[in-house]
Amino acid sequence: MKYANKSMTELLKEEERLKARYKEIEDQCLKDGLPFSDFEKKAEKEAESLYFIDKYKRLKQDPIVEYGKEWKGDTYTLEEFKALAKSKALMDSDGYGYYATETSKSDVYIMPSDVIENILRNDFSHVIWFNK
């Protein structure tokens, strides 16, 4: 993917540019009285790029790790989480997870679609999953 080798600074700059372009498209569609479906079509490229920038930012962010708290989510090894995502037993619409270890939770979230798209961190061994 075109964002894989970008630095966090580059990702943030591109995100800012795309958000501005997205807003321009939205404003123009509203001014022209177009239906929302037309706006979605016109802004599809920007929306998709913002989606992937968000995923790659999570790969590069410095995690904040919390220790010693009891989380009321389901804890899976990263391999278990991958298997559940690949089998579609967990989907993005089901909830959200955070990268973790056996004894800590980070502030970096993970979604099942990250597994499907192979956009994953390798510095955590577990995922804490929270169903909606």
Image: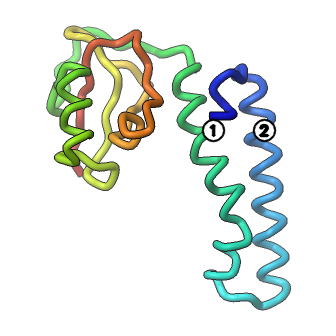
Q: Is residue 55 left or right of residue 34?
A: left
Nearer-the-camera pick, 3 or 30 = 3
Which residue is found at the position 67% from the left and 88% from the top? 35
Residue located at (73% from left, 41% from top): 15
Rendering quarter of residue 70: top left
- Looking at the image, is mark 2 or mark 1 earlier in the sequence? 2
Distance between mark 2 and mark 1 Cα atoms:
8 Å
Q: Is residue 130 above or below residue 100?
A: below
Mark 1 neighbour class, 10 Å CA radius: few under 14, some 14 to 19, many 20 or more? many
Q: Which residue is disc 1 drawn over?
A: 53
Please tell me in which quadrant of the rendered image residue 56 appears. top right
Mark 2 and 1 residues: CB-CB less than 8 Å, in contact?
yes
Is 20 on the left or on the right of 101, as rendered?
right
Q: Quadrant of residue 98?
A: top left
Residue at position x 53%, y 28% from top? 58
Percent from the top left, x then y, of residue 82? 26, 30
Q: 129 or 38, which lies in front?
A: 38
CA neighbours of label 2 inside 10 A, class few (<14), some (14 to 19), many (20+): some
Which residue is pictured at 33% across the width and 40% down the height? 112
Mark 1 element type: helix
Residue on which disc 2 sits: 14
